[in-house]
Amino acid sequence: MTAPLRRRPDRRYGMRMPALLDRHGRPLRNLRLSVTDRCNLRCQYCMPDDGYRWLPRGDVLSFEEIARLAAVFAALGVDELRLTGGEPLLRQDLPVLAGMLARVPGVRELAMTTNGVLLRESAGALRQAGLHRVTVSLDTLDADTFRRLSRRDDLARVLDGIAAARAAGFAGLKLDTVVIDGVNDHELPALLDYARGIGAELRFIEYMDVGGATRWSMDRVVSRARMLELLQARFGPIRALRRTDSAPAERFELGDGTVFGIIASVTQPFCATCDRSRLTADGMWFRCLYAEQGTDLRALLRGGAGDAELAGTIAELWHARDDRGAERRAHDPHRRPLLPQSQLRANPHLEMHKRGG
């Protein structure tokens, strides 16, 4: 069956591009590209255990393969690309890839999510190559808490990286904070003050039960409602802003005009408007963050498939997409971590550092 196309405006080119729809009418628009599964931090909500099985280097997609797949996805309506990992800045010569992707026709926004440890050294080159936006993970401003969360002592380097991104001219700088009860929930006002002070938009994220979060439990989740209570106690009335896109964050405004976001994937899933999918560093395509099965696009690519065959496969699979993983998890009265450690060992593609956040 041929997937239905719906015309949508393209803000960059002032024309209408086709949008590929899934079974729930959600367009294929946002593709997250993991460029490596390796990471220089060991954050407890992502990689809490040891003994990782890294991808063989020969399995990792080359820059040319990534750019080719990105172009196929763009021809199907994807206009937002985000570089992820692992930690994307561990991929050698990343600005070269950024430049290749920035030239893909139809790409309106090219962004990157990073832990910031290596950002100081590469911010300028990435900006010059054509990267549009940067999001930096910042879970704490306290060195001891950072060390406990990440098992590394790199907070100063992360803050330097954020300063370098600002100096390089990245507009719309965002900071992401995973909030965990009893760990960093008391820091919400301080983190928001910091973001306001540097002109960044902070997004608080509910602690999610995916991938390597094998120690997750519901009582460690700080809900959106609780976050708003904590922030209102410090800053006064908070106003919800009207949603204007399919981004995962709900946005709010303080009395002084400071805007921040909350990604409430656990207590308020946004599956109904989710337009994003993920491509792992070795070419496995996942259409839901909670999906246990993906599609090996690398095998097609290296098996000699042409662009038309790749596009046909992608279109057919997106058209059949019925995933609403977060919603289904939200209705589970006995909710536990998504996967046990034994299952992650058997299938490393289920790890968050493999498929990107």
Image: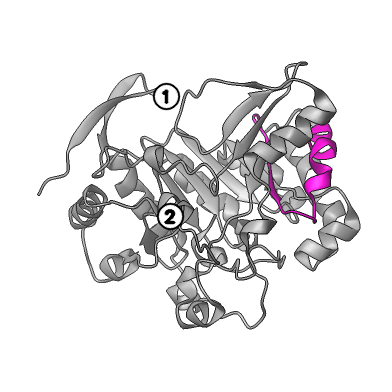
| x 12%, y 46%: residue | 2
Q: Residue at image x 53%, y 46%?
A: 265
* Relative to 162, residue 283 above or below: below
Near-viewer residue (261 or 221): 221
Q: Which mark is residue 278?
A: 2
Magenta segment: does it hold 253? Answer: no
Which segment did they paint magenta? Answer: 171-196
Residue visible at 74% across and 34% down?
Answer: 229
What amino acid does circle 2 point to? Answer: Arg
Give the position of the C terminus as an image quadrant: bottom right
Residue farthest to the top, as pictured: 256
Vertical comparison of 234 with 323: above or below: above
Residue 160 visible within the image:
no
Label 1 vs 2, first from the N-terminus: 1
Is 52 placed left or right of 8 in the picture? right
Dot 1 amino acid type: Arg
Label 2 SS: strand
Say which element carries label 1: loop
Q: Is residue 129 left or right of residue 314?
A: right
Residue at the spot of label 1: 12
Looking at the image, residue 31 lies above or below residue 200: below
C-alpha separation, residue under disc 1 versus residue under disc 2: 23 Å
Q: Position of residue 307 (x, y in %)?
A: 23, 54
**Which residue is farthest left?**
1
Report if residue 236 is visible in the image.
yes
